[in-house]
Amino acid sequence: MKTFSVEEKENIEKIINSSKLCYVGMVDDKGSPYVLPMTFGYNEGVVYLHSAQEGKAIRILCKNPKVCIAFCTDPELIWQHPDVACSYRMRAGSALCEGEVVFEEDFVEKEKILHIIMRHYSNKTFTFSVPAVNNVKIWKVEIKSMSAKEFGVMRPGSIT
Ligand SMILES: Cc1cc2nc3c(=O)[nH]c(=O)nc-3n(C[C@H](O)[C@H](O)[C@H](O)COP(=O)(O)OP(=O)(O)OC[C@H]3O[C@@H](n4cnc5c(N)ncnc54)[C@H](O)[C@@H]3O)c2cc1C
């Protein structure tokens, strides 16, 4: 079972779009890392997130907006021999994206972004009340660099 680098943007996007959650890594002003699981939406090279207006993450991002976001598809436990521990693997796709958080303040844009986030989880069309839009903090991360790997794959041309 092998690990492959995924080079094509559309295949990296498939991994992102197949992931239910992301893990947003940031670094505070003392150099300490802080990572949060979050729901997200993705569209054309931009990751969209939402949160409360205040909290530790917001305080960190106001000082240092750089983030690294990890995505992972639902992993499947696989093995070549059930009695051999080191033959066990997780089969999954994983993507990493780097960029900077910009907070969106425009009401109409915020509403559009909430639709993008909900589209990741449901085919339903939702409406958002004015307070719901006003009370949410919207994060936009334009992806500056991305990489991805597929783990636990049986294919020729593997890298490990
Ligand atoms: C599956 C899942 C999906 C989520 N999706 C979202 C989302 O889309 N948007 C969103 O805003 N939040 C989401 N959360 C919650 C998110 O992970 C944070 O807890 C939340 O955003 C608050 O972060 P904060 O930095 O403002 O925390 P604060 O309330 O300021 O945190 C205070 C302290 O609590 C601890 N803490 C905070 N969050 C966590 C955590 N997740 N786990 C353990 N300790 C923690 C930290 O030590 C921190 O110092 C999700 C959580 C889960 C499990």
Image: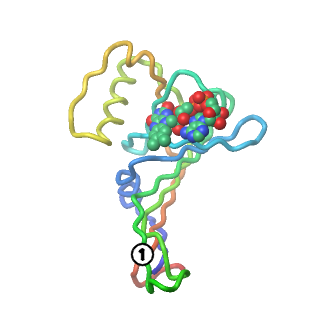
Q: Is residue 122 visible?
A: yes
Quadrant of the rendering where the N terminus is positioned: bottom left
Circle 1 sits in a helix, a strand or a loop, which is it?
A: strand
From the viewer's perspective, is 58 left or right of 2?
right
* Residue nearest the viewer, comparing 115 with 34: 34
Name the residue type under label 1. Ile
Outermost residue on the front side: it is 83
110 up-or-down from 155: above or below: above
Q: To which residue does mark 1 refer?
A: 78
**Residue in view at x 41 percent, y 63 percent:** 8
Which quadrant of the view contains residue 110? top left
Question: In the rendered view, does 114 fall on the left or right side of 96?
Answer: left
User: Within 10 Å of the Cα at label 1, are there few (<14), some (14-19), or many (20+) other Cα atoms?
Assistant: some
Residue 62 position, x and y percent, is 64, 27
Residue 152 lies, with reference to residue 94, above or below; the image says below
On the image, which quarter does residue 18 sit in?
A: bottom left
User: Which residue is located at x 50 percent, y 45 percent?
Assistant: 143
Whether residue 140 is visible to the viewer of this picture, yes or no, is no
In the image shown, does 95 or 81 lie closer to the viewer? 81
